[in-house]
Amino acid sequence: MSSQALGEFELIRRCFASGFPIATDALVGVGDDCSIIRPPHGYDLAQSIDTQVADVHFPATAPARLIAQRALRCATSDLAAMGAAPQGFHLALTLPKADATWLDDFALGLRETAHALRMPLLGGDTTHGPALVISIGVQGWLPAGKGMTRSAARAGDDLWVTGPIGAAALALPQVLQNPASEKDLARAYYRPEIQLTLGQRLLNLAHACLDVSDGLLQDAAHIAQASLVDIRIDAGLVPTPVTADDERWTSCFTGGDDYQLLFTAPDARRDDILALNSIPGAACTRIGQCLTAAELTPQVQLEHQGQRLDINGNGYQHFR
Ligand code: ADP
Ligand code: MG
């Protein structure tokens, strides 16, 4: 059954002009040359952009609704990592064809997720091109001067994660085999928990923070290098979907796409941080420590039962 092909402006009107959360601070949204946002007094604007390419970041044959859900969730995770409250997003969409059925499904997934994350759609761009590419620019508000960065960890800090690590990587074989599956681990891949509430509540508790998008070890190294501290992780403390006797266990430390937060905080904050686990979806777990850097290049060391654990392969990089 062939589906209707849409023109550019019809497409925008049908899919992106309505049905999204309303931005109370947007004076102008979809439909004009720019969106116009009025900043609240005393806040900094946090901005990030994220691109997903078909068959690089997701299977091109996955259901459009799931592709949209995942793209907006992954992009919004950067706001959670800095502790920002969501303000809204812009969507740049490159499509090989403007198929009405596919686009309706995509818009449905995007709307559902925008409501779940409270992210108004502010505008975007729609173009024709050889592959499906989704770029999402997100923005949010941070109390002035309070944003959490990767460079704020201090020697002596505890290292924490906000939930299970490794599920999205373990889901990958299943997702590639059956891109339409939303069962079990595939759910973690398509609908990662985005810790927006937790991120904002960490603002006055945590030092450094980021979201685990490229693998626990690689992302921990980003904090270590930016903050000039060594990091020691106790592998046995990391919440993983499989246990140490499973051959897939080590891939939990290098696999990406979980979007949990990895953060450091002084040990005096342990009880305050554990109290945050009353937030739905939050499971803050202490997994290691920051130490004074022993060498010029800060190191991340993974240990298990007192032994150093050497794992082959790092996290994901597009260019090596
Ligand atoms: P311009 O030519 O000024 O760049 P466009 O014709 O590309 O504007 O887009 C018309 C309007 O539709 C703009 O307000 C733009 O923000 C919005 N828009 C275009 N594509 C999208 C999209 N994929 N998602 C949301 N808004 C979009
Ligand atoms: Mg214009």
Image: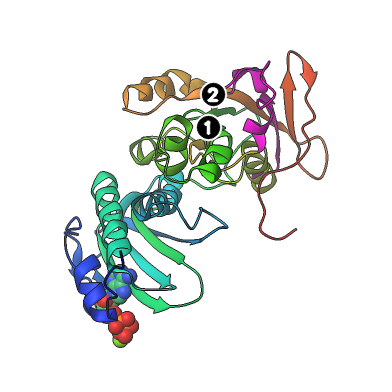
Q: Is residue 305 above or below residue 114?
A: above
Quarter of the image where the N terminus is located: bottom left
Residue extending farthest top: 305
The residue that label 2 is drawn on is 241
Q: Is residue 191 above or below residue 278?
A: below
Label 1 sits on what residue type?
A: Ala
> Quadrant location of ligand 2?
bottom left
Residue 305 percent coordinates (x, y): 73, 13
Q: Is residue 197 visible?
A: yes
The reply to whether discs 1 and 2 touch (Cβ–Cβ < 8 Å) is yes
Q: Nearer the viewer, residue 27 or 188?
A: 188
The residue that label 1 is drawn on is 167
Which element carries disc 2, helix, strand or loop?
A: loop
Q: Residue at x 47, y 46 (%)?
A: 179
Residue 261 percent coordinates (x, y): 49, 37
Residue 119 percent coordinates (x, y): 28, 54
Q: Is residue 89 above or below residue 194?
A: below
Magenta residues, start to end: 227-254
Q: Residues within 10 Å of mark 1 (few under 14, many from 20)?
A: many
Which element carries disc 1, helix, strand or loop?
A: helix
Q: Is residue 34 above or below residue 233?
A: below
Q: Is residue 147 visible?
A: no
Residue extending farthest right: 295
Q: Is residue 89 left or right of residue 58?
A: left
Quarter of the image where the C terminus is located: bottom right
